[in-house]
Amino acid sequence: MNVQNPTPLPKKPTIPERVAFDRVEIAQIMMLYGRMVAAGEWRDYGMSFLKDAAIFSVFRRTAEHPIYRIEKHPKLRLKQGQYSVIGMDGRILKRGHELKGVLRVLERKLIRAVD
């Protein structure tokens, strides 16, 4: 007679303590950041990983308020979209389900008329 060990129950999925951007999201944000730094528009950034949101803040100078915040709120992924770009005054400039589409609102700042 063979004795089998009981099959363990699947573990309950753990909820992460903090929300963070994944590698692909960081790459998209940093590509935009690099182009804006090269254009002289942005100079510094900061990242915050909170319990319910991940925030990438963009600064024109280090000692001031961020001019833009790129936020990820996973709880909103089934509603308005988990990504948003927020301006200095707190207005939501763009919100959506895909980060690339949301970042387009900032890429428009790179388009300039050539003399």
Image (cartoon, rainbow, N blue to C red):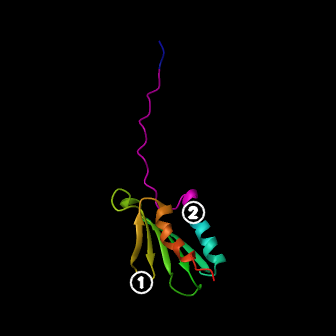
Residue 44 pos. (x, y %):
61, 79
Q: What segment is highlighted magenta in the picture?
A: 4-27
> Decide: marks 2, 1 in contact (CB < 8 A)?
no
Query: Label 2 is placed on what type of residue?
Result: Gln
Residue 15, magenta (yes or no):
yes
Residue at figure coordinates x 52%, y 61% from the top left: 21
Residue at figure coordinates x 50%, y 67% from the top left: 103
Q: Nearer the viewer, residue 104 or 57?
A: 104
Q: Quadrant of the C terminus?
A: bottom right
Q: Nearer the viewer, residue 41 or 51?
A: 41
Tell me: 36 left or right of 96. right
**Residue 89, label in figure:** 1
Residue 41 pos. (x, y %):
59, 81
Q: Quadrant of residue 95?
A: bottom left
Residue 49, magenta (yes or no):
no
- Element under disc 2: helix
In the displayed orientation, state which residue is furthest to the bottom: 63
Query: Label 1 is placed on what type of residue?
Result: Asp
Q: Check the image and report above or below for 61 versus 55.
A: below
Q: Main secondary structure of the magenta part?
A: loop
- Which residue position holds label 2? 28
- Element under disc 1: loop
Q: Check the image and report above or below for 31 versus 12.
A: below
